[in-house]
Image: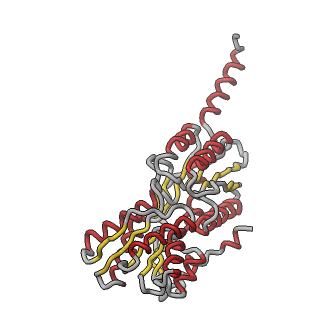
Amino acid sequence: MRFPRPALVLACACLWLAACGPSEPSGGTTAKYEIAVVPKGTTHEFWKSIHAGAVKAERELVARGIVTQVVWQGPLKEEDRDAQIQVVENFVTRRVSGIVLAPLDARALVRPVDSAIAAGIPVVIIDSGLERQTASFVATDNYEGGAMAARHLAELLGGTGKVILLRYAVGSASTEQREKGFLDELAKNYSGLELISGTEYAGATRDTAYRTSQALLNRYGDQVNGIFAVNESATIGMTLALRESGKAGGKVRMIGFDAGTQSIEDLANGDVQALVVQNPLRMGYEGVMTAVSAIRGETVAPRIDTGVVLVTAQNMNSEAVRPLLHPPLAEYLD
C-alpha cells in the first residue's frame, strides 16, 4: 500500500515515538509518572519501611507539581524468584514510567531488567545488587555492615572465642556482601576468633530461620560464644532459638542485622547485644526520587550509599539512632 506523503511522515513519527518508550511530555502537557516499586517481599518490617520511603517521595514530588504515582507490588514469599520476575515483566508490559527494584537474585533478574531497559523504562536497583548496569544503585554498604559486625563481636568476646555465621539465601547479593565482609574481617584481623559454622542458610522466613538455628545450637551449643545473623528473619529466628535453649541474655553474644520490632525488643532486653541497622526508609525515598530524575533526563549518581549504623543498648535511644529504629510508618502507610 502506498501512503500519501503527509500520512507517511505521520506514520514514521508514531513508530519513532513508540520505540523510544516513556518520555517527558512536551508542549506544556503535565507529566504523570507511574513508578513501580518491586521489593523482595512484603511482610518483613524492612520492606514496609522501603514502602513508606517510596510514598514519602511520591508526596514530595506531587507537592512540587511533578505528578507521580507509586505502585507497590512484590512477591508474597521472599524466596519466590519466579514471582518477582513475573511482577517485573508485567510492569514492562504495562509500560510504567520507571521501575525501582530490590532483586531477589543478582542473576535471575537480569533478563527482565534488560527487557525494561530495552523498552525505554529506567530501572533503579535498591537494597541488593544486580549483575547489570542500571540508572542507579541505591543501597547500604553491606560489606562494611558485615565487617562492622565482626569488629563488634570481637570486642564483645575479647578477641577470642568460637563463632557462627548464619547466612540468608543463595543469590541474594546484599546478604552475600554482609557475609563476605564479616568473614574477611575475621580472617584479616581476628585470628583468635574461630568460625565453627559458616555454611548454613536461614531461608526466607522466621520459621525456617528458627529451625536452622535450633539445629545449629543442638550441634554447637556447648561450644559457641558468638553469632552473627545477616538479616531480620535470621536474627529473630536465631534469638528465639537461643532463648529457648537458655543461651540468650549474653551467654552467647548475638549480633543481628536490621531493626524489626521484635529485634529491637530483644536488643532492649539483652537477648541481642547489637544490631547492624540500615535506613530502608531513605532507600525507598531515594529509589523513587532517582527514578523520576532519570525519566526526566537529569543526571543521577550511579551509586547512592544510604548508610549503616551499629546499634547497641547504649545508643538505641539517641537522637541519631531512634528514627532508624522507629521510622514513621503510620505517617505514610494507611
Q: Does the rendering let one see residue 296?
A: no
- Classify 241 as above or below 184: below
Pick the residue in front: 93 or 85. Answer: 85
Q: Does the rendering let one see residue 330?
A: yes
**Residue sitting at 33 percent across and 77 percent down?**
162
Pick the residue in front: 132 or 267. Answer: 267
- Classify 65 as above or below 218: above
Pick the residue in front: 324 or 56. Answer: 324
Q: How is the image coloured?
A: secondary structure
View extreme (top): residue: 1
Task: Tell how many labels.
Answer: 0
Question: Left or right: where does residue 110 sit relative to residue 28?
Answer: left
Residue 168 position in % (x across, y down): 47, 62
Residue 45 position in % (x across, y down): 61, 69
**Residue sitting at 54 percent across and 85 percent down?**
319
View extreme (front): residue: 218
Quarter of the image with the N terminus is: top right
Residue 112 position in % (x across, y down): 55, 42
Task: Report which quarter residue 303 is drawn in.
Answer: bottom left
Residue 111 position in % (x across, y down): 52, 41
- Classify 15 as above or below 26: above
Question: Left or right: where does residue 182 sit relative to residue 287?
Answer: left
Task: Report which quarter residue 11 is drawn in.
Answer: top right
- Classify 17 as above or below 260: above
Pick the residue in front: 56 or 132. Answer: 132
Quarter of the image with the C terminus is: bottom right
